[in-house]
Image: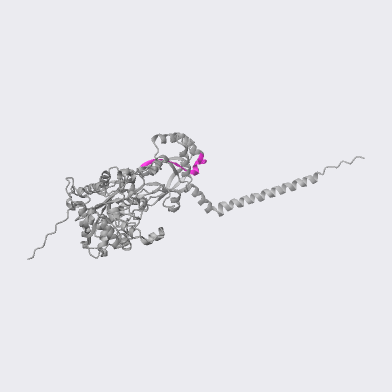
Amino acid sequence: MPQPIRLKDHEKDARQVRSRVFIGMAVIAFLSCLLVARMYYLQVMQYDYHSTLSENNRVHVQPIPPTRGLIYDRNGVILADNRPSFSLTVTRERAGDWKKTLDTVVEVLGLQPEDKELFEKRMRQGRRPFEPVPILFELTEDQIARIAVNQFRLPGIDVAAQLVRHYPLGEHFAHSVGYVGRINEQELKKLDPVNYSGTHHIGKTGIERFYESELHGQVGYEEVETNARGRVLRVLNRTDPKPGKDIVLTLDANLQAAAEKALGGRRGAIVAIQPRTGEVLAMVSQPSYNPNLFVAGISFKDYAELRDSIDRPLYNRVLRGLYPPGSTIKPVVALSGLDAGVVTPSTRVFDPGYYQLPNYDHKYRNWNHSGDGWVDLETAIMRSNDTYFYDLAHKIGIDRLHDYLNRFGIGQRVSLDMFEEASGLMPSREWKRVTRRQVWFPGETLILGIGQGYMQTTPLQLAQATSLIASHGKWIRPHLAKTIENQPPVDSNPMPDILLKDPANWDRITQGMEAVVHAPRGTAHKMGATAAYRIAGKSGTAQVVAIRQNERYNSAALKERHRDHALFVGFAPADNPQIAISVMVENGESGSGVAAPVLKEVADAWLLDENGKLKAEYAKPVVAESTKP
């Protein structure tokens, strides 16, 4: 039987539609109220917060790096200045896919793949938001033009003008002035992030590094308004940076040139000091290098050539070169013996050409194998008699010898403002026990007396020891800075003056050193024969390879770099010291024949006028004798 057809209930359907419409309207009303409430909360209750946030998005504070201080020599010759240069910068926030942008830069400028690797490394260094990161320095006009033509393909890329460091005299002051280079990640962690914001270079070596805080200055700021793309629309406020302080060095460019000429292209070092002030007048380490290569980032090829060169041009021989002082240390040893009271000026030792310790068979040879016979102190210095100084060192003993030489700066840093300086080595019983786990042997004291053995010194230390003899023990640390913004540097850790029991011993040692140069039997009498003034000096040789017992030094049988180093120290004029000099010529063999003429040439450049006469201001004043009434 068929089912009955149900009639549609229109009234029920209408009620269902009305209920759904009501619920929908209620939901819409609720959501509208919620939206209005949220808008009220954001627009009214959090108005200050969002207005500030909006302002911060529109206004940015950009650092203004300070201008680095200049460096001059003592006569006003500029050694380090700043010159305008154009660099390519990337603002990461504007560049989008900055790696893709760097690919385009490499393509546009025709660079190599390794250049992109360097760019990426620089981009990864931590920087403030919207701060441009320089990736390529010293752009050429052609490169600037290519960037301008392809600017539409290079979002976030700009060409910025800035001042970069420049060293007009190049390699002549590389080891003293030093150079600046790009801040690396390790340095970035240690620096003040505020004061170095916007700065991309820092002092790496020499004066540039030691006086970094003075040369750098204080950063400035400017508030700028930017658009949505980060481009600057206008400057709202500006605080100018404080430029770095200018530094005047004690170095003399003319004397530096004369010293380099005197060295004649040989490997070596020269230091010249003014004894009464401690001012370093010349500081030469040869060979040298061009510091301008490091400012914008040296290429891998150029750096490899410098690093791998057998002549080591990057090595600062003046401050880091460690050499046995040889016989140049004998005047200090003699002074130590006099002050310790173990010898007098008239004490004599017989020299048969060697020295033997009591109850020992080993013979310690004198350089003059035939011997000098009876030798007193002045003759021992004049002839550089090894036998006398073997005996003297044995009488002094290692403990007193260590203490005396240490007072003259041997085995410690002596400079005021040369951070690279090595301390050298003045050995002692304790040093050998700790480092070698051995006792000290008597023969080791003997060879220290002639500047051999474990002792290691720098050319700067030898110059300072010589300066102390010239100034009769007045301790002033050698320094390179003469004034910093017209103020002299201050020694916060002064060394005590050397006070002898008998001050007359200073003159006795000076007489012996004068005899080295001016006496007929002096080891450097050939140099002294042509001198226009009196020079007090001492020659020396430093062994590079050991010579066996009973063997003689044979230059022809040795490779050039295995031959002895030639040394000479001295001051002049001897009766009124104005300059103290140490000279070291690597593998030069003869201190008196090779190094001594170099010292004289440097001294002449400082002391003589254009007519070859001693300058009037360096002549010792004549004191008139008083007459009785």
The image shows residue 92 at horizontal and vertical percentages of 49, 43
> Toward the viewer: 130 or 246?
246
Coloring scheme of the render? Answer: one colour
> Toward the viewer: 279 or 590?
590
Residue at (57% x, 52% y) in the render: 42
Which residue is outermost to the left?
Answer: 629
**Span highlighted in magenta in the image:** 84-99
> Toward the viewer: 394 or 84?
394
The image shows residue 271 at horizontal and vertical percentages of 28, 50
Judge whether residue 287 can be spotted in this image. Answer: no
- Magenta stretch contains residue 269: no
Residue 233's image quarter?
Answer: top left
Q: Left or right of 161: which side holds 450?
A: left
Q: Quadrant of the N terminus?
A: top right
- Magenta stretch contains residue 88: yes
> Toward the viewer: 136 or 149?
136
State whether residue 489 is above or below residue 83: below
Q: Left or right of 176: which side holds 371?
A: left
Judge whether residue 60 can be spotted in this image. Answer: yes
The image shows residue 382 at horizontal and vertical percentages of 22, 54
Q: Left or right of 315: which side holds 120?
A: right
> How many dots with numbers?
0
Residue 287's image quarter?
Answer: top left
Q: Left or right of 96: which side holds 543?
A: left
State whether residue 145 is above or below residue 341: above
Q: Quadrant of the C terminus?
A: bottom left
The image shows residue 54 at horizontal and vertical percentages of 51, 49
